[in-house]
Amino acid sequence: MTNPLQRRPNQDGRHTPNLWPVWLVAPGALLLVGLAAYGLYHGAELLLASESAGKKPVGVQDVIKTTVTVLTLIGAVLAALYAYRKQLLDEGASHRADATQLTERYSKAAEQLGHEQAAVRLAGVYAMARLADDWPEQRQVCVDVLCAYLRMPYETDANEPGFRHGEREVRLTIIRIIRSHLQDPTEATTWCGRDLDFTGATFDGGDLSGATFSGGQVTFAGATFSDGQISFSRSTFSGGQVTFTGATFSGGQVTFAGATFSGGQVTFAGATFSDGNVFFNGATFSDGQVTFSRATFSGSRVNFGGAKFSEGKVTFHWAAISGGRLDFGGATFSGGRADFGRATFSGGQVGFGFSTFSGGVVHFNHSTFSDGQLTFRGSVFSGGRVLFNQVTFSGGQLDLSGVTFSGGLSTFRGSTFSGGRVTFRDVTLSGGEVSFRGSQVGAAASTDWGPFSPLPVNLP
């Protein structure tokens, strides 16, 4: 049973003013006006009588005039309220009409996205993007539809069943539109801070360069990069999360060249790198985290050449490196942390050649080397720490030829050299500390300690 005193429920959409029923408001208004008139009449009579005390008695006409004047003012106020109510109703009708139109545009754009012809699908992409700009309340929904299109099955080989002509252009257009909406977070139509879900999608190109990731979550989890180039170059990561968890890099190129990481997180945890390239050349890490934990490297190349680490963290914790190349050549470490703890090296190359270490930490603690090559050739250590504690070398090559130690701390404490080759040729020790305390060198290991300067080096 409904309550007659309860206001009418909103049935016409959220833009309809929540008003009392007319049959309840009208009698109440009449009653209030009658009571107000009665009260005003007697109030005016008493007021005028008090002001004319000792004078000529106040006439009834004067009382009536005063009452009518006040009632007229009240009537004017009520008329203004009625006009305001009417305006609310008109605005509600207008908003409902707009909402209906937006819903119809959404349905039409979604229908176009499912069309057989690529040209019609392209029209649907632009229509959905424009709708997202015009409909802030449902902007995330429109963005989700475009992302869902990229998650649909995609055949890149023209000779395989399921291949659709023009499909690549449709997908590249979606990525290009997303990029254009991530350039300026202050724009009224920005998509910065929105969630972008590309889970399981297949990429053979795309441009997201210059994008700003200041919030929300962008996920490429389980995505496949098989060809082409997808670019995050010069992008800014100041918040939120971008994840490539479980992604497969079997070809193509993903580049973060010149990107700025001042916050947030980019993760490649559990990703597989069997071919292709991932570039962080010239990137700046002043905060945030990039992680390759438990990633598998059997091919491919991940390049941090010329990157600058003043804070933040890059981690390869528990990574399995059996092929490919990880290159930090020419990088600058003035802070932050690069973590290879418990990684397994059974092949491939990891290079820090000609890098500069003036702060921060790079550590390989508890890692295992059975093959491959790790080189610091020509690097300069003037501060910070490089740690190889509890590391097992049973094969492969560790090359520190031409390294300069003028400060900081480099330790190989508790490590075991049972095989492989360790080279310190042409090393310069003018400061800092290099410690091999507790390490063991087996007969099968090949070591070239080079001409060490007369500094305290603790050999087993």
Image: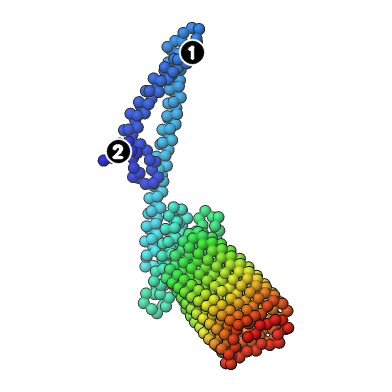
Q: Quadrant of the N terminus?
A: top left
Other residues around mark 2 within 10 Å, as few (<14) / some (14–19) / many (≥20) = few
Query: Is residue 208 visible to us here?
Result: no
- Residue 325 place in picture, x, y as percent: 55, 81
Q: Quadrant of the C terminus?
A: bottom right
Q: Secondary structure at mark 2?
A: loop
Left or right, residue 193 beside residue 375: left
Q: Quadrant of residue 6?
A: top left
Amino acid type assigned to the residue bearing label 2 in the image: Asn
Q: Secondary structure at mark 1?
A: helix
Disc on res. 50: 1
Q: Residue at x 50, y 80 (%)?
A: 320
- Residue 262 place in picture, x, y as percent: 58, 64
Badge 2 or badge 1: first in the primary sequence: 2
Q: Are marks 2 and 1 in contact (CB under 8 Å)?
A: no
Q: Residue at x 51, y 81 (%)?
A: 344
Q: Residue at x 45, y 73 (%)?
A: 246
Other residues around mark 1 within 10 Å, as few (<14) / some (14–19) / many (≥20) = few
Considering depth in this image, is 454 or 145 the residue closer to the camera? 454
- Residue annotated with mark 2: 3
